[in-house]
Amino acid sequence: MSDPTPPTSRFAPQNKTTHERLSTNTVGLVALSDYRKRRADVLEQQEREAREAAQGARAANTSTPDRSATATPNNAASDNSETVDRRKTKKTKKKQQQQQQQRAKALVSFADDDEEGEDAGGPAIATLRGKGTEKDKSADGPDDGGDAAGDAAAGSESAAGDDKGKLPAKVAANASVSIVPRALTKAALRREAAEREALRKEFLLIQTAVKATEIAIPFVFYDGTNTPGGTVRVKKGDFAWLFLDKSRKVGAQLGVGGDKSSNARRDWARVSVDDLLLVRGSMIIPHHYEFYFFIINKTLGPGNKPLFEYSAEVAPADPGAAGPGQAGLRGGPDISELEGASDDPTFTKVVDRRWYQRNKHIYPASVWQEFEPDKDFSKEVRRDTGGNAFFFTK
């Protein structure tokens, strides 16, 4: 009966490579972690077999006579195995020292990527040089002087690496910038929020004081002709409809239109605010707008003229003004002393809406237009209903 094991060839390599051992121990698909573990086991086994072979060779050298005169390449390799192991141990220690130095540099170094690349390439170059010297030494035999030279070269390379790993001189970032931004900490954010809130409250107080300031608006009743209406006292924060209501009462007191109707007072008493229009220049002011809106925005009308030319600042305190306990003794300054009391009364017209509907195709009602906040009236050319520009437009 024949032996099932195939005969081994005398020319076949006795030591398997790492790849062959991995192929033998690995069957099918395995996880990456298992593959790495098996590869580490195979490498450890190879190193162990190499050490055992070196120890057996040393034992054989001590028990057998010197055959250096008739040594073959295999015998020479076995004789020099101890020297190779010693050099490998030295190289391993040098590599570990260089790796530790590189880790320390990586923790504290802020050098450029080029310098890092040079530092990373240093150990590889040293390894190649070590391999070359190892081949030379294995061919020529052991040489202690070569080891000393290799140690000196490694020491010079490590010293050069230490010089490269030194931190560069500190340079101020953005040195040309004169203003350095503040760090947005929680305390700084709270402080900014408190400042914004204080400014908001201050603005609201100023706005309230400005709105409470009284002004005088002289006006006329217009129905084709200007009928003097007097002067109305209002506040900067009042609406346009409130001015129309006060002007209606003034018209009832003066009996405007008595020459045309015997019951003029009764007619004025029956007139509603919605039946009246406030015309400022050639602009019809809607009822729901405050005077403060035009004052704070400095709204311009046709001819680049402000619609309500009043101050948006707080009026200085009057030392002769009535105090809290004298509210009933004095009702405030005289109307002739108020801001706007000396304005042209014909610039402000109070018009009956029914009259305007009947005569809006006749000049000057034909050029009146309702105010729109998004429209710029300062550069507008005045035209009639046919689109013809007025020759006397300023």
Image (cartoon, rainbow, N blue to C red):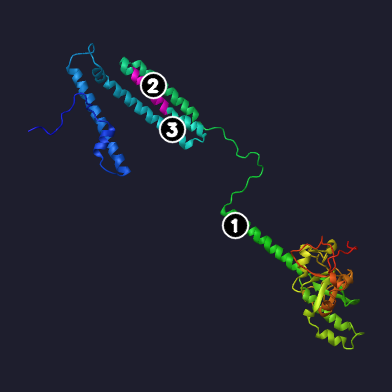
Residue sitting at 39 percent across and 24 percent down? 128
Residue 381, given in percent of the width and then of the height, sits at 84, 62
Q: Which residues are magenta?
A: 123-136
Query: Residue 190, which numbered label?
Result: 1
The residue at the far left in this view is 1
Give the secondary structure at mark 1: helix
- The front one of 118 and 376 is 376
Label 1 or label 2, whichever comes before in sequence order: 2
Q: Which residue in the structure is indicated by mark 2?
A: 151
- Tag 2: residue type? Asp
* Residue 231 falls within the magenta-colored stretch: no
* Alpha carbons under labels 1 and 3: distance apart: 45 Å
* Alpha carbons under labels 1 and 2: distance apart: 63 Å
Give the secondary structure at mark 2: helix
Type of secondary structure dominating the magenta stretch? helix
Q: Could you tell me if residue 182 is visible in this image?
A: yes
The quarter in which the C terminus is drawn is: bottom right
- Tag 1: residue type? Arg
